[in-house]
Image (cartoon, rainbow, N blue to C red):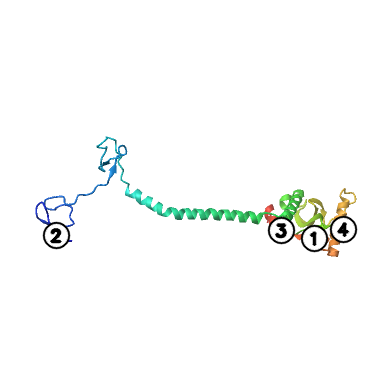
Amino acid sequence: MSLISCPECGQEISDKAKKCIHCGKILIEEELPKKFCAECGKEIPADSKECMFCGYPVEQEKPENPAVAQITEKVRKNKKPIVIVAAIAVVAVIIGLIANFAGSALNEDEQLAYQNAVQMQRMMRDPDSFRLYDEMFLLRYINDDGENEYTYTIFKYGGANGYGAITTDEAIFKDGEYIMDYADEPDEDDPDYLEQLGAKMDILLWQLSGDSETWQMVEIDIDKIKDKMGLE
């Protein structure tokens, strides 16, 4: 910075001064922002309320509140992280739902076992006392053509009897129809006597022979069935 003489009064002033501090002489004209009339397109002073050429009213820009400007700037800066976090949260929820559905979905074998267990529960004197124990499997009979001719579902269950005591047994279903409890003996007076007798003989034959080509055993995930039925 250096000193110069004011062209008006001759006093020394800074070469950066916009006006003389002694006489008030304007040394550097401040350049006002340019504005153009929206009607005729001519340049007009920035503080004009109307165009000096055509009289078109000029809309005045309202100064932004500093507090509002500060908040707006923070929102602008933080908007992207917020969007990213929200997107991650949505994806996490979707993945959780998919995982939960996949974990609880039953395959074809489990669905058959589940339906039979539900039917057994409905047959109980006290359905709320129904329990499933850690033994449940399917036993498929494969004929000479290699086809699954019929399937037994066998599972251990328990429930309250007429006296309130908990009894246990093993239920035998054939293709979704209840046949008998394993501890029972086939009843000649029962219309399903032949089915009962056949089931007993089939299971005994499988136990004695261990023939894995004729008999295919499929173990069932008992916990998935319990979860589906809402059992402990």
Disc 4 residue crowd, few under 14, some 14–19, many 20+, Cα 10 Å: few
Q: Which mark is residue 121?
A: none
Q: CA distance from mark 4 to mark 1?
A: 16 Å
Q: Which residue appears at 77% of the width and 49% of the height?
A: 123
Amino acid type of the residue tagged 1 in the rendering: Gln
Read off the residue under disc 2: 3
Residue shown at the point (80%, 60%) measured from the top left = 216
Q: Can you name the residue that lies furthest to the left here?
A: 10
**Label 1 crowd bin: few (<14), some (14–19), many (20+), radius 10 Å:** some
Residue type, numbered disc 2 = Leu
Crowd class of label 2 (few under 14; some 14 to 19; many from 20; radius 10 Å)? few
Do tag 1 and tag 2 residues touch (Cβ < 8 Å)? Answer: no
- Looking at the rendered structure, which numbered label has been put on residue 201? 4
Circle 3 residue: 222
Q: Which residue is mark 1?
A: 216
Q: Is residue 88 left or right of residue 70?
A: right
Q: Amino acid at mark 4?
A: Met
- The answer to whether residue 104 of the structure is visible from this angle is yes
Q: Nearer the viewer, mark 4 or mark 1?
A: 1
Q: Residues within 10 Å of mark 3 (few under 14, many from 20)?
A: some
